[in-house]
Amino acid sequence: MANGTLAATLENYLEYKSKKGIFAWILSTDHKRIGILYLVAMVTFFWVGVTLGFLMKLEMLTPGKTIVDAQTYNTFFTLHGVIMIFLFIIPGIPAVFGNFFLPIQIGARDVAFPRLNLLSWYLYIIGGLFAIISLFLQGGPIDTGWTFYVPYSIRTTTNVILPLLGAFILGFSSILTGLNFITTVHRLRAPGMTFFRMPLFVWALYATAWIQVVATPVVGITIVLVIIERLLHVGIFDPALGGDPLLFQHLFWIYSHPAVYIMILPAMGVVSEIIPTFAKRTIFGYKVIAFSSLAIALIGYFVWAHHMFTSGMSDTSRMVFSLLTFLVAVPSGVKVFNWVATLYKGSIELRAPLIYVMMFIFLFSIGGLTGLVLGSLATDIHVTDTYFVVAHFHYVMFGGTAVILFAALHYWFPKMFGKMYNEKLAIWATPLIFIGFNMLYFTMFILGYLGMPRRYWSYLPEYQTLHIISTVGSWILVAGLMLMFGNLIYSLFKGKPAEANPWGGVTLEWQVPSPPPVENFEEIPVVNHGPYDFSTINENKDGKS
Amino acid sequence: MESLDATNTIVQQEVGTKAHHISDPHQHKDAVGAKIGMWLFLFTELLLFGGLFLLYMAYRLQYTKDFVIGGQELNIILGTVNTIILLTSSLTMALSIAAIQRGKKDLSIIFLVSTILMGLAFLVIKYFEWTAKFSHGIAPNSPELLSKPNGEIVFYGMYFSMTGLHALHVLIGIVVLSFMLVFLLRNKITKEDYIKLENSGLYWHLVDLIWIFLFPLFYLIH
Ligand SMILES: [Cu+2]
C-alpha cells in the first residue's frame, strides 16, 4: 500500500492528476502549480502593459496628436503604470519563482499555508479584474497616474474607486504571500538547513516578505481613505475641508518606496543564484550579501520622502531624507561588488541566464547612479517630474527587476517545465533587448535633462529628434522581447528534454528531477554544507566515477 | 532561539513526512506555524491602524483647539460603557480558550457566546452613538458640519473613519467567533487542537487593544 501512494506522489507535478481538467490547476494547492498560475497571469498582464507602453511611445513620435488624444494618453500612462507595478513587478519574482523554488531550496514539501497561497492567487486575479473592469464602465478609465495623488483623485470624474479597490486587494494578496513565506522559512527548513546555509535567493525572499508585511498595510489604509473621501467627503485628504494632501503623499510613499525593494530584492537574490552556478565558484561574501538584503529592507523604510522634495516640506526633513537616501545605496553597491568579485577568476560559462545578469548589472548600475542625481536636493529640483525620472525608474525596474525575471525564466525553465530552451535564439534576443532598451530609455535621460516633463501628451518641436530615437528603440525592444518569449513558448512544446541539473548548480532544486515530483523530495534531505559549496559536489562526483 | 527553531523544524518535518502520504500531499498541521502566521497578520492590522494614528497625530497638532471642542461633544458615558464591555469580552475570550484547554467544552461555549454577545452589544451602542450624532446634523458632508471650522470637520472625519473601521473589525471578529462556535459544537476544536480558537482570540484582543487607544484619543481630550 505504501508503495502505491509513494509512487503517485513521486509523479512529476505537471502530470499529476488530482482533479479533472483545469480544476487540477486552479484548485491546486501545490506551490509549484500556483507558481505557474502566477506566471501565466503575469506574462499576460506584462504584454498588456508592453502594448500600452508601445502605443505611448508611438504617440510621442510627433508633437501634438499622432494616434490618440490627450485624455486617452492620460489613461494609457495610468494603466501602464498600474499594470506594470501592481500586477507585474511587485508580485513578479516572489509570486512565480519564490512560490516555485523557496520550498524546494530549503528542502520542504510546500509552503507553510498552501491554501492561503492559492487564496493569494485568487486575490491577485480579482484585483487585476477590478482594474480591467473599470475601463469599460461609465465615467471612463482612471487618469490619475499610478500614484493616485489627491486632490485630483478625489475630484476626477473617471472611475477611481474600482482600480483603488483592485490595488487594495492586490495589497492583501501581497501581504498573505509575505506572511506565508516568513512562516515557511521559520518552520519548514530541512534538517541541517540553518539560516546561514540558506541560498541567497531565500534570504532575499525572506527580507522581501518582511517588507511586504510591514509596508503594504500603510498603502492599504491610504487607499481606503481615498475611497472614503470620494464616497463620503469626510475631509481627511480634501484641502477644501481642512485635509492635507501632503499627508496622503507621506502615507503613499511610506509604502511605495519600500515597494521598490519588494521589486528589486528578489531580483538581487536571483542574481546571487545565477552567478555562482555559471562561475562555478562559491559566492563572494555570502553573509554580507545576506545581511545587505536585511539592511536594504530596514533603511529602505526611512527614505520615502525623497519622492516629495518639491512638494513643500521643511528643509530639515528634506536634508535628512536626502542623507538617508544616499545611505540606502550602500548595501546595493556592496552587492554589486560582491557579484563582480565572484565572477573574478571563476570558470565562467556564458549562457543566456548569465548574459541577462550581466545586462542587469550594467543597466541597474546606471539606474542606481542616476538615482543619486535624484536623491540630491539641488539636482533633483532641476530634473524632478521630467523624463529623467521616467528613465531612472525604468533602468531600475525594467533594466533591474524585469531583466532578472527574464534571467530567472531561462535559468529555471528546464527545472520548471522539464524542457530545454533554444540557447542560440535566447542569446540572439539579448542584444536586441539591450540596444532597444538603451535607445528607448537613455534618450529619456537627455530629454529630461533638457526639460521634457513627464506625462505630457505634446512637446516642443526641438525635442522631436530624441523622441524619434526613443520610439525606434521601443520597436527594437519589443522585437527582442517577442523573440525571447517566442523562443520560450516554442521550447515549451518542442524543446529537448532537460536533465535534472543542466547547469551544474548545487542548490537543492538541482538535486530533484526536472520537472520536480509532486512532493518535491522522495525523502526530506539532510543538509550539511553551505548553499554554494562546489567543492563537496565535485568530490562526490569524483568519488562516484 | 536559532537552535530551538531548528529542532522544532526537524520534528515538524518528520511529522509532516508521515502525514503526507496519507491525505493531500500539500496539507499538514503545524500549530506553531499557524501562530506565527497569525501574529504577522495582527502586525499588519496594527500598521493599518498605525497609518490612521499617524494622521490623527498630524491633524491634532494642526487643529488642537478644534479637536478639543470636538472631543467634548462626544458622549463619554457611552464611550466608557463600550470600553468596559470590550475589555470584559476580552476576558471571557481568554476564559473560553482556557476552558477548552482543560477539556471543558460546555464552559468554553458559554464564554464564547458571551464574548459574541458583548461584541454585538458594543455595535448596538456604537449605532446609537452615531445616529445621535446624525440627528444633530453631524454627518460627513452635512451642511451643519460644513458650517463648522475646518479643524472640526477633520476631527469628525477622523472620528467616523477610525471608529467606523474599528466597528467593521468588531463585526468581522463576531463573524469569525461565530464560526469558532460552530467548530466547537461540532468538535472541530478540541482539547488537543484548539489553535483556531486561540488565533481568533488573538484577533479579538487586537480589536480590543485598538479601541483602548481610540477611546482616550477621541473621548477624553481636554
Ligand atoms: Cu523612493
Image: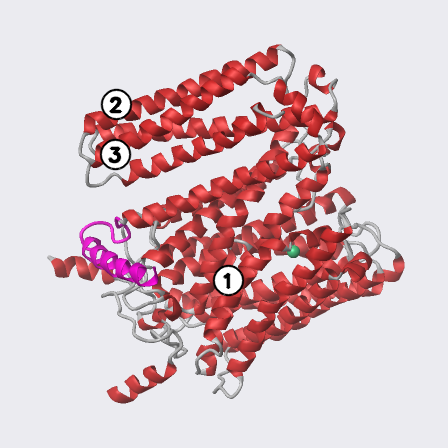
Q: Within the image, what quadrant is residue A506 found in? A: bottom left
Label 3 lies in ligand 1 vicinity (Cβ under 8 Å):
no
> Which of pointers 3 and 2 lies earlier in the amino acid sequence?
3
Kind of residue at disc 3: Ala
Chain ID, mark 1:
A
Residue denoted by label 1: A294
Point out the residue furthest to the front here: B222
The answer to whether residue B179 is above or below residue B19 is above
Q: Position of residue A155 (x, y in %)?
A: 72, 32
**Which quarter of the figure is the C terminus of chain A placed in?**
bottom left
- Residue B14 colored in magenta in the image: yes
Q: Position of residue A243 (x, y in %)?
A: 71, 32
Instruction: Between residue B52 and residue A283, name the one nearer to us.
Output: B52
Mark 3 to mark 2 CA distance (whole Å): 12 Å
Kind of residue at disc 1: Leu
Chain ID, mark 3:
B
The answer to whether residue A119 is above or below residue A281 is above
Mark 2 to mark 1 CA distance (whole Å): 46 Å
Residue at 13% in and 59% down: A2
- Residue B4 colored in magenta in the image: yes
Residue denoted by label 3: B98
Tell me if label 3 and label 2 are in contact, CB under 8 Å.
Answer: no
Instruction: Between residue A242 and residue A394, name the one nearer to us.
Output: A242
Q: Position of residue A382 (x, y in %)?
A: 82, 59
Disc 3 vs disc 1: which is toward the camera? 3
Circle 2 crowding by C-alpha within 10 Å: few under 14, some 14–19, many from 20: some
Magenta region? B1-29
Label 1 lies in ligand 1 vicinity (Cβ under 8 Å):
no
Give ligand 1's quarter of the image: bottom right
